[in-house]
Image (tube, rainbow, N blue to C red):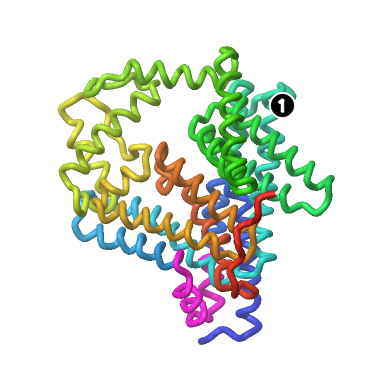
Amino acid sequence: MPATPEARERAEIVFKWAAVVLGCSIPISVATDNVILGLILLYWIAGGGYREKLAAIRRNPVALATLAMFSMYIVGMLYTIAGGDDVQDAMTKALRLLLIPALMPLMREKQWRRRGIWAFQGSMLVVLLVSYLYWLGALPVNTLLKGTGHDPVVFKAHITHNVFMAFAAFLFALAAVDARTRGGRLGFFALAAAATVNVLMMVPGRTGHIVLLVLFTYFLYRQLRAKGLALAGLALGVLAVVVFLSPGTMLHKRITMADDEFQQWRAGVPPDPTSSVGQRMEFLRNTLGIIRDNPVAGVGTGGFAAAYAVRVSRTGEAPTKNPHNEFLLITAQFGASGLAVLLCLFATQWWLAARLPDRFDQAAARGLVLTIVVASILTSTLVDHAEGIFFVYMSGLLFAGYGGAGNRERLSEPTPS
């Protein structure tokens, strides 16, 4: 029986608030994420109006690219070498992709999209405050949180913490540019600076370090064009000199450790389990071998773990389900065609970002693409729960504005100031 207009409106309101709360939950709790995702699914179905929802999805290129990627997982089930558990696990994670088209029909209004962004920023403010308290020794170590004085994370491991905090710093900087008052501008820039210090000087997550530097460069380029690139180059040069001359800093130690681990790595020799770089180099070498043996269609949905186990069975190396590189993982499972679909999704997002309703959305969407592309080189972003939910949530929110009310004409990129 079709939903009445009143029931449909109630379901849509609950859906929208659940989506906003998910933005708050992503940096904090996996369990809460899953509960909210269940509510989102329930009220998306309860709201009816499927013809209008599907029409909105068909009009959105990012939604179509996402559905193409999800379809790739379904096709990959037909020839996979994986067992049932690995296939189920891979499909469960692939289902997250459907959040992107699910959000698009119902989160088109700017006020709801902004609420979702604010919810994420609000959670990251709490994370930032608690992280500083840990770092300053004002908060005792406890079992409810993950952090210590030497690794002042809060709810997530340091890789995820720094990726999220780098993106939050970028959002704070964008908010500062849009602020209408001098106080608001200074306040947001102060938050961006505090988040930047948290990433670079406090939390040892190298993936987030690189993401932050890329976002910093893009932000300056977007605001100042060629002058921004020159300024970014100068700032990065100064940072490099400061780090080089400050051997006691966390950033210097992490760079030195990475260099030492790379120097110690030898191809085909099982790396020290504590060597992050050594393990990643072995993942790279072995995964490229899997891709070389299955270049066109890969080993199928969830087949990476089985293929990797066979490859290392005679070498004494440890098996893994995660090569810590999303591009490698997708290519191993689905071959060159799978890599093409993933790159098409990112390219579609980058292209469509310029056609979003305002400059904040344009910049935030392209910042999201840069964040995920850079992080995907060093982690398997679609496999990891927090990064995967973050990507699909932000994609659904930001690109829901395309084709919505008040978005009939393309706004140009901001003029350099």
Q: Which span is picked out in magenta? A: 40-62
Instruction: Specify the quadrant of the image occupied by residue 39.
Output: bottom right
Please state if 260 lies on the left or on the right of 396 as rendered: left
Q: Residue at x 66, y 83 (%)?
A: 6
Residue 105, above or below 160: below
Closer-to-camera residue (235/253): 235
Percent of width and height locating residue 371: 51, 45
Residue 351, above or below 258: below
Residue 167 visible here: no
Percent of width and height locating residue 29: 57, 45
Residue 301, above or below 213: below
Please state if 327 lies on the left or on the right of 28 as rendered: left
Assess disc 1: are there few (<14), some (14-19) or many (≥20) residues with their C-alpha within 10 Å of its C-alpha.
some
Disc 1 residue type (three-letter) = Leu
Residue 55 lies in the magenta stretch: yes
Q: Residue at x 59, y 53 (%)?
A: 364
Closer-to-camera residue (70/318): 70
Closer-to-camera residue (323/257): 257
Tell me the chief SS of the magenta region.
Answer: helix
Disc 1 is placed on an element classified as loop
Residue 57 lies in the magenta stretch: yes
Report the residue marked by disc 1: 139
Please, which residue is most extreme toward the front here? 226
Instruction: Specify the quadrant of the image occupied by residue 213.
Output: top right
Q: Residue at x 58, y 68 (%)?
A: 410
Residue 112 visible here: yes
Percent of width and height locating residue 340: 31, 55
